[in-house]
Amino acid sequence: MLLQGAPVARAIADALRGESDALRERGVTPCLATVRVGEKDADLAYERGIAKRCEQSGVTVQRIAFPAGVSQETLLRELSALGANPGVHGILLLRPLAERFDDAAVCAAVPPGKDADGVTLTSMAAIYSGAHEGFAPCTAEACLALLEHYGIPIDGKRALVIGRSFVIGKPVSMLLLRRNATVSIAHTHTQNLPALCREADILVVATGCAGLIGAQHVRAGQTVIDVGIHTLPDGSLTGDVRFDEVAPIVDCITPVPGGVGAVTTAILCRHTIEAAKKSAR
Ligand code: NAD
């Protein structure tokens, strides 16, 4: 089965529409602020995807864009103004930022209650503690939303997450663990990756290495979630998994593009609406 992201995103957005309408009736217009530095193609494409999904979900978007040379001080000032603005419920900072920025300091300027993409230490701690503060990173939660939408069993299953970043690998591992999967995490020092991969029922691949996972890593009966996204010289997109080799072997697989990425923006809307609901209490 092809685990396409679009139907998942549409189902989430449709459900959110009702919630955003209910909020509007109470005088609250859910609003996401996106903050961009520079004009990177990937950021602009992400912004367009966000705008489309927010419209479907009934979320207003406030787009803020700074020139590439903006100072950290100005960026911090803007984030703190958005944090104090009661009309803004979610804040998304397009990352990675250029190296000259202190990423930790910039992320810390987002109030946890508006941390729609889970970049603050409060959000990260909540993933591990189970506290209802902040939000999980959208991409990590999108992996779980795909599994749930397509009815892939998680409870008691063996999951292997390849990648241990704070953005994807670690949070997705914790989210799978919360749903009672038996979770292993593989990384650059892992030995005999193909054999480890073949043991898993669910493989989540988030390595940033195009085409790392091929036929020797998989077997029949598995579900493969490919988080990777890479632009080839001809402009086309590809993932961390060699789709043409792996798809005929496994039971379920996400395409790239059209898999996890499509769901990420719907989760961003969900977080913004949850934040708006909390602010309206
Ligand atoms: P990262 O570079 O921060 O982390 C990569 C992780 O993979 C590291 O923990 C590393 O140990 C592991 N790794 C790298 N090479 C490996 C190898 N050969 N064997 C085993 N482990 C290996 O990357 P990230 O931020 O977690 O992103 C991962 C991928 O997901 C990237 O391709 C990125 O573009 C993509 N991404 C997709 C979305 C989306 O919405 N679909 C969002 C964010 C990131």
Image (cartoon, rainbow, N blue to C red):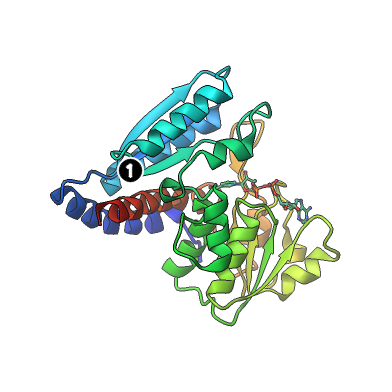
The residue nearer to you, when weighing 16 against 218, is: 16
Q: Position of residue 264 (x, y in %)?
A: 47, 50
Q: Is residue 259 left or right of residue 171?
A: left
Q: Position of residue 205 (x, y in %)?
A: 65, 58
Name the residue: 29% across, 48% down: 57
Vertical comparison of 242 with 219: above or below:
above
Name the residue: 34% across, 32% down: 62
Q: Position of residue 257 (x, y in %)?
A: 53, 46
Q: Position of residue 26 (x, y in %)?
A: 15, 51
Amino acid type at mark 1: Cys
Name the residue: 63% across, 31% down: 234
The residue nearer to you, when weighing 212 against 53, is: 53
- Quadrant where the image shows the C terminus: bottom left
Helix, strand or loop at disc 1? Answer: helix
Vertical comparison of 219 with 242: above or below:
below
Task: Give the total number of marks visible in the rendering.
Answer: 1
The residue nearer to you, when weighing 2 against 128, is: 128
Badge 1: residue crowd in 10 Å (few <14, some 14–19, many ≥20): many
Q: Residue furthest bottom?
A: 156
Vertical comparison of 237 with 185: above or below:
above
Vertical comparison of 228 with 173: above or below:
above
Quadrant of the image occupied by residue 89: top left
- Provide the residue designation for mark 1: 54
The residue nearer to you, when weighing 222 against 247, is: 222
Can the viewer see residue 251 in this picture?
no
Q: Is residue 52 left or right of residue 241?
A: left
Quadrant of the image occupied by residue 34: top left
| Ligand 1 within 8 angstroms of badge 1 C-beta | no
Can the viewer see residue 244 in this picture?
yes
Name the residue: 54% across, 33% down: 42
